[in-house]
Image (cartoon, rainbow, N blue to C red):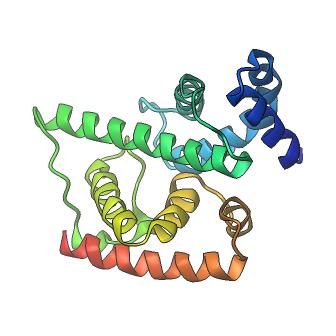
Amino acid sequence: MAIDGSEITQLLKAWSAGDETAIERLTPLVYDRLRRLASHYVRRERAGLTLQRTALVHEAYVRLIEGADIDWQDRGHFFAVASQVMRRILVDAARARGAEKRGGQLECAIDASAADVDTIAAPGSDRALDLCALDDALTSLARLDPRRAQVIELRFFGGLTVEETADVLQASSQTVMRDWKTARRWLARELRRA
């Protein structure tokens, strides 16, 4: 089902302006996309672990709805915030799981041989430390280059394609690919140093 970006934008603006019925009309338009975003990451998680796609989507959606005072700009803004929310949920779950296993605070460190964004495992896996280290490195990247950090966040945590990321960021696909490659190299270097 194709998402009508202008309809989503209108509903988001109506919701921001206080129209309570807008959220009811918005939900079916964005829910499938949110499930796709969650699927990208959770699909690598082993069966039986705590954080499943539906739970991630529901938790993210609840947090987004609670953020009703956000002045939504457009659908790209919505999906960018949704990716950030999912990132926070995933990282928080990874930190909690790691802390549980270790009986205290989770120290984020990564095996230097695994310092590649594409090989970071799901938060419920044995590599929760990797996710935490990626989050720390991504936070550092955001201070240096917010757009490149957002490209990683949208593509890695959000599961968006290059074209979808370009649409959200209102940039060309070539710019997104260039940012993706540069940011991945920077993150790999940071993760190896961690």
Q: Is residue 171 left or right of residue 136?
A: right
Q: How many marks?
A: 0
Q: Considering only vertical position in the picture, is 49 above or below 188? A: above
Query: Where does the N terminus fall, quadrant-wise?
Result: top right
Q: Nearer the viewer, residue 157 or 63?
A: 63
Q: Considering only vertical position in the picture, is 95 above or below 172? A: above
Query: Where does the C terminus fall, quadrant-wise?
Result: bottom left
**Can you give x and y, in whole percent of width and height, for residue 113 in the image?**
27, 74
Residue 3 seen in this snapshot? no
Residue at figure coordinates x 23%, y 73% from the top left = 112
**Can you give x and y, in whole percent of width and height, for residue 171 in the image?**
69, 72
**Can you give x and y, in whole percent of width and height, for residue 193 in the image?**
19, 75
**Can you give x and y, in whole percent of width and height, for residue 150 in the image?**
51, 62
Q: Nearer the viewer, residue 158 or 71?
A: 71
Residue 62, by quadrant, is top right
Residue 61 seen in this snapshot? yes
Residue at figure coordinates x 49%, y 71% from the top left = 148
Q: Nearer the viewer, residue 98 or 189?
A: 189
Q: Is residue 130 left or right of residue 108?
A: right
Q: Considering only vertical position in the picture, is 193 above or below 67? A: below
Residue at figure coordinates x 35%, y 35% from the top left = 93
The single residue placed furthest to the front in the displayed view is 17
Q: Is residue 72 left or right of residue 7?
A: left
Q: Is residue 29 left or right of residue 172?
A: right
Residue 191, by quadrant, is bottom left
